[in-house]
Amino acid sequence: MIEITRGESPLVLGLPHTGTDIPDDCLARLNDTGLAIADTDWHIHTLYAGLVDGATTVRTTVHRYVIDVNRDPSGESLYPGQNTTGLCPLTDFDGVPIYLAGQEPDAAEVERRRLAYHAPYHAALEAELQRVKAIHGFAVLYDCHSIRSHIPFLFDGTLPDFNIGTNLGATCDLQIETSVLQICKAAGGYTSILNGRFTGGWTTRHYGRPADGLHAIQMELAQSTYLSSEAPPWTYDTPRADRLRTHLKTILETLSDWRPQ
């Protein structure tokens, strides 16, 4: 359920949305839309694999339709006033229900899932951040995400290729934010934005405490940058992905080498 690869550098990669596992008791509740699991961060763990030596990775194999580990466990919205999905999503990213009628999880079921899946992921992530912080005196969390570039329910128009989130600069040292943005802006043929539609999910906001030596930054990639199509079967496009991996490698190496001034 939780996959951990330990490294000795200050860099920790969070992989909250690449999992496709749905326990049988949850699976039986989903309708055809839910069973399609369209809102997966498809192949993101493959995209980032082997880009930098020494990084730690923490991944959950459980799908976000079971519970979204990048949401506030209290259920509070990350983006008040905007369309979004919750801790245990009831709709997909297009606003279409994912549950059979009457099978939506109640408060008790949400809490059961929080304890079973959300809490263990964050216990593992917290432990790894503290482990590398004990080695270096600080830690850098890079939260890995991707999403379709066209989702009218969530945002207008076309999403930029690189979407960097630091909660308006609150979650990491300015040099980290600036360095990542400069790399993205210099990437020929790609578009980028800092704190646009996505300013960092709960993970970035929760762990990003620069004063405590914990720095966090979220990268939301448009899936058009590395998939053959943003529709089933969501095929990994190796030539396209390899072009993107060149820039991602530069980002991760820069974060691995960064030290507080």
Image (tube, rainbow, N blue to C red):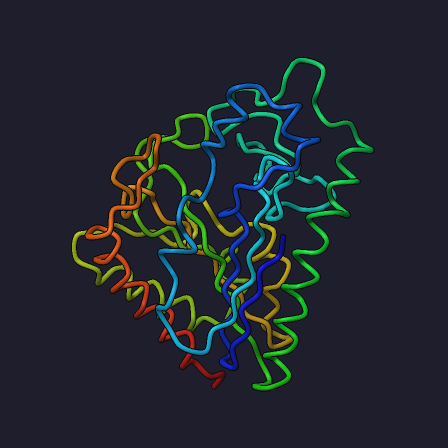
Q: Quadrant of residue 76?
A: top right
Q: Name the one closer to the observer, 113 or 194.
A: 113
Residue occupying the point 59% across, 48% down: 70
Residue occupying the point 23% across, 58% down: 242
Q: Position of residue 164 (x, y in %)?
A: 41, 55
Q: Is residue 16 left or right of residue 105?
A: left
Q: Position of residue 93 (x, y in %)?
A: 48, 29
Q: Residue furthest left?
A: 188
State whether residue 67 is above or below residue 220. above
Q: Residue furthest top?
A: 101
Q: Name the one closer to the observer, 17 or 183.
A: 17
Q: Residue furthest front?
A: 24
Residue occupying the point 54% across, 25% down: 34
Total marks shown come to 0
Q: Where is residue 107 in the image (x, y as percent from the top left)?
A: 80, 31
State whether residue 254 is above or below residue 207. below
Q: Where is residue 87 in the image (x, y as percent from the top left)?
A: 66, 38
State whether residue 131 is above or below residue 81. below
Residue occupying the point 58% across, 52% down: 60
